[in-house]
Image: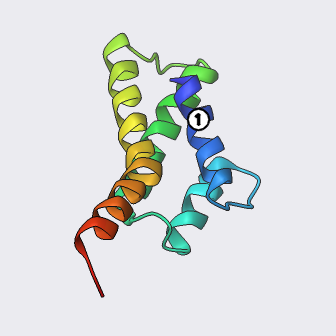
Amino acid sequence: AVMCRRALQAACKMKGATKEKLVDQIDELAEKRIITDNLKELAHAVRWVGNDAAHPNEKEVTKEEAKEILNLTEQFMYVLFVAPTKVKEIKEKHVSD
């Protein structure tokens, strides 16, 4: 869960986030319309669980939660990095202007 949070922060920076804190970086990408509101909420969920894993307190991260956060992180990365390339490839193949 901590590594997912870290990967999320690296992705935010790669997409142009300039704020210092991850919470602000996620919101910044949403404000710039680089990510949708749904992706923003997904990213915050990863951040919350990652924070709990990094800073143990009363909230313990279960194995199931960690698996779900990994799944959500993979989906976030797919939408942010893989899908745009796939769409471009399809567009080049099928759209002739």
Residue 8 appears left or right of 92? right
| Residue furthest top in the image | 63
Q: Could you tell me residue 28's position as x and y percent?
A: 60, 66
Q: Quadrant of the C terminus?
A: bottom left
Q: Is residue 78 above or below residue 2?
A: below
- Quick one: label 1, few (<14), some, or many (20+) residues within 10 Å? some
Q: Residue at x 42, y 41 (%)?
A: 45
Does residue 9 appear left or right of residue 77 in this picture?
right
Identified by mark 1, the residue type is Ala
- Nearest the camera: 32 or 46? 32
Q: Which residue lies under the disc numbered 1?
A: 7
Kindly state the secondary structure of the residue where label 1 is placed.
helix
Q: Which picture quadrant has residue 69? A: top left
Q: Which image quarter: residue 73?
A: top left
- 26 above or below 50? below
Looking at the image, residue 25 lies above or below residue 28: above
